[in-house]
Amino acid sequence: MQETRRAILEELAAGAVTGPALADRLGVSRAAVWKHVEALREAGFDVRSGDDGYELVDVPAYGAMAVEFGLDAPYEIAFHERLDSTNAVARERAAAGASNLVVLANEQTGGRGRRERSWDSPSGGVWASIVVRPDVPPARVPLLTLAAAVAVTEAVRAVGVDAAIKWPNDVIVHGTGERGGRKLAGVLTEMAGESSRVSWVVVGIGVNANVRAADLPSDATSVSAETGAVDRRDLVQAILERFAARAADLDAVLPAWNEHAATLGQHVRVETPTETFEGDAVDVTETGALVVDSDGQRRTVHAGDCEHLRPV
Ligand code: BT5
C-alpha cells in the first residue's frame, strides 16, 4: 500500500481526525490528504466526514488494502478478482525480483496442485501465493511448506474447525467420523536457486474458505461447510501472520508440524511417483520426508501422497 495512504489509515484507526491535522502530521498538503481519502473510499473503506473530521466507519471485506490494513506481517498484497493461478503470477513476480509479496485472488481458473494436478478454486476461497527470498540452503525450503500447513491449521482451528495435517501438506478435518479426513486446504511450494542458495520461494496456499461443498471434489470440504462462513480478511491475515512468524524461526517448525499432524501413528498407504506400499508412519525428517516402517524396514519417502488406513 502506498505509504501516505497507510499512514492515513493508521491515524484514522486511532480515532476521528481533521484533514488539516492529518496534513500536518504526515507533512503533506490538504489536497493530498483529500485525494488519498478519496482513493481509500474507492477501495471500499467507509470514511465519513463529520464535525470531528474524517472517521473510519468500516473496512472493505476483501482486497489488497483490506488485507494489508492491520496486517502484522511484512507482506505487500497484490489482489486479483480472477486469475489463472496465483502461483504462476507469483513466480513471474519472483523472477522479476519481488520479495515479501502475496498474490491473492478471489477465484482461480487454472489452480494447480502438486504433480500437475488441478486445484478447484471457485470464488470465495483463499487462494494465495507468498513470495519470499529466504537466506537458507534449498534443503531447508520444505520447512516453509510445513510452516504453511501449520499456519493454515492453526488459523482454521481458531475459527472452530477441528483440523489436522496429513503428510505432506494437506489440511484435513481431524478424526475418523463421517467428516474426518476431508480436505480443507493444500500447499504447493515452488522455488528457484542454486545448489547452495535459494533465489526465491513461492508458497502457494489454497484454503476452501467460503465455498459450497458441491463446488469441490467429493472428498473435500470447506470452512463454511464445517462451521459457517468466515471473514476471509481475518482468515488470510491470521494465516499470513502465523506463516511469517514460523518462517522466521525455522527450527521450531518441525515440532509444531508434529504437534498438528494426524499422519504419525497411522498405518498408511504411500504412493510415490514410482511405487505404492503400506506401512506405519513413524517420523518426519528435517527435509519434510516421511519415514515409514514397512515390514520391518525403514523407508524414507521424499515425495508422494499418503492415505491414512487406520491407527497403528
Ligand atoms: C495440493 O496439491 O494440495 C496443493 C494445492 C495448492 C493450491 C494453491 S491455491 C493458491 C496457489 N495457486 C495455485 O495454482 N495453487 C496454489 P495436491 O496435494 O496435489 O492435491 C491436489 C488434489 O486435491 C487434486 O487432484 C484433487 O483430488 C484434490 N482437490 C482439487 N481441488 C481441491 C480443493 N479445492 N479442495 C480439496 N481438494 C481438492
Image (cartoon, rainbow, N blue to C red):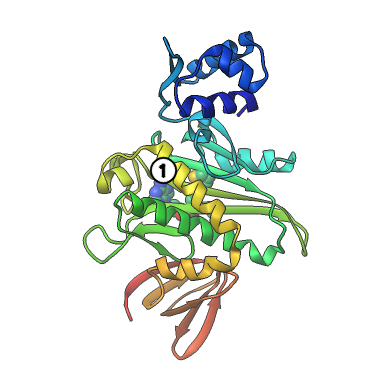
- Residue 310, x across and y down, in percent: 30, 75
Q: Residue at x 55, y 13 (%)?
A: 19
Query: Badge 1, how many Cα within 10 Å: few under 14, some, many 20+?
Result: many
Q: Secondary structure at mark 1?
A: helix
Task: Tell me: is circle 1 under 8 Å from ligand 1.
Answer: no
Q: Nearer the viewer, residue 185 or 160?
A: 160
- Disc 1: which residue: 235
Camera-nearest residue between 150 and 114: 150
Q: Quadrant of the C terminus?
A: bottom left
Q: Is residue 66 visible?
A: yes
* Position of 32 relative to 66 (above/below): above
Quarter where residue 99 is shown: top right
Report the residue at 25% width, 57% height from top: 179
Residue, far left: 178
Q: Amino acid at mark 1?
A: Leu
18 left or right, relative to 76? left
Task: Answer yes or no: is residue 112 visible.
Answer: no
Determine whether, in the image, residue 100 is placed left or right of residue 246: right
Residue drawn at 54 percent across, 35 percent down: 84
| Residue toward you, 269 or 122 | 122
Q: Residue 300: percent from the left, percent from the top?
A: 55, 78
Q: Specify the quadrant that holds the N terminus.
A: top right
How many numbered callouts?
1
Q: Position of residue 275 (x, y in %)?
A: 51, 73
Residue 7 at x, y percent in the picture: 59, 27
Residue that appears at 50% across and 16% down: 42
Q: Is residue 24 above or below residue 65?
A: above
- 216 versus 29 height, above or below: below
Examine the rendered structure and indicate whether residue 28 appears above or below residue 279: above
